[in-house]
Image (cartoon, rainbow, N blue to C red):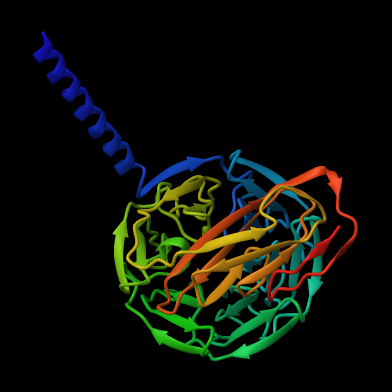
Amino acid sequence: MKTFTKQFTVCSFLMSLICLMSIFSFSQNTWVPKANFPTTRAYAVGFSIGTKGYIGTGFGQGIGHPKDFWEWDQTTDTWTQKANFSGGGRNSAVGFSIGNKGYIGTGKPENATMPTNDFWEWDQSTNVWAQKANFGGTARDRAVGFSIGNKGYIGTGVDANFTMDFWEYDPSADTWTKKANFGGGTLADAVGFSIGTKGYIGTGRYTTIFWEWDQASNVWTQKANFGGLGRSGAVGFSIPSIGKGYIGTGGTTAAAQSSDFWEWNQATNTWTQKANFGGGLRVNAVGFSIGDKGYIGTGWEHYGMSKPVAADFWEYAPDTTTGCVATAVISSDPSSTVCVGQNVFISASGGTTYSWNTGAAGANIVAAPSVTTTYSVMVTDAAGCTGIGTLTVPVDPGCTATGIAQFNTNGLQVEVW
């Protein structure tokens, strides 16, 4: 009996281990359906701020070109309508985020024969849209955009012709600066994303090209071609914490859509095919990432179906292993609960460049939160590897800071309260 008991215990342990290994295995490289976007949509824009994702504008079946703007909460898997986009309904615009602000610009307004170059900022804290300086290039649609640190970027697209120019937006000065033209030539219907201090543009016009832009040197470098067939209207996003970018779906011809999905490893410059997009064939969908998860939703299903415009929304869990990762260390002073409005010195290390979710750059920032707030920083080391550190500053709502605070970002200072 004792021998049997021991054998049974070992067997149970092994079965449990196998089960856990199976669960872990299937939790990676998988698609999980989330709550549908409230209406059908294609040619929309999407971006994320913190743990929230945003989708707006585009084209909807039976509703034309709406100007609605929606927030998705990763924690509750619910959609909440926010203030309508003040620039009006349009399709094929560009969207990205910097800190707690979102931006939408360019695109083709409803009933317009030509695209526009207007540019708008949305404040997450106030839910208010404000018009900013017009995009620095010609009016266009079908361009790409992304952000790096506290700067935004828009390039390529279609004005009267296909374009290749590339522009940088500085929100602090509300100005546009022309940068080096996209290295792959004229392009439209491409994808764009960033990892660390590098930006990436690829595919478009049924090509497989893929190029890297260095923010520090303003130089474009061609990378390994996209691993799938050439395409237009695909979706791209990155998960910077593991140094990987993703491109999938899109049209491989004018009448053929795809569902394949590919991962690019920044450390090795290689493409690997991953699990097909869970929603099936798709073109002109929208995508973004939150933390270590990616998201794709909406878009056109393959033509000829009774309901060609989709509203589904899917979460992708990647393989989180990486051969190139920087270790981000983040700390604060004080490190305990603070009063409302009290200055907190937050410091990061582990990289040569730093990009905070507040939009700030540099190793040190000063915050004065009014509610409990989580701060995150993406560090990039000398080898180009990236890592993310997070820190939550607890705030006591019953305690308000008063007094004199001497503080700067160069070192710790004495505070008198």
Q: Is residue 321 left or right of residue 204?
A: left
In the rendered image, which quarter is residue 15 located in? top left
In the rendered image, which quarter is residue 45 located in? bottom right
Residue 58's place in the image compared with 169, above or below, is above
Estimate the x, y position of residue 106 in percent, counting from the top left.
67, 74
**Closest to the observer, 236 or 290:** 290
Q: Residue furthest top?
A: 1
Q: Is residue 287 left or right of residue 385?
A: right
Q: How many marks?
A: 0
Q: Is residue 69 left or right of residue 243?
A: right
Estimate the x, y position of residue 229 in percent, counting from the top left.
32, 68
Q: Name the residue: 25% across, 33% down.
A: 17
Estimate the x, y position of residue 107 in percent, counting from the top left.
65, 71
**Closest to the observer, 249 or 40:** 249
Q: Name the residue: 63% across, 66% down.
A: 95
Which image quarter holds the N terminus?
Answer: top left
Q: Name the residue: 66% across, 53% down.
A: 335
Residue 4's place in the image compared with 280, above or below, is above
In the rendered image, which quarter is residue 159 located in? bottom right
Q: Is residue 167 left or right of residue 247?
A: right
Determine if residue 148 is in view.
yes
Residue 37's place in the image compared with 216, above or below, is above
Determine if residue 236 is in view.
no
Residue 288's place in the image compared with 212, above or below, is above
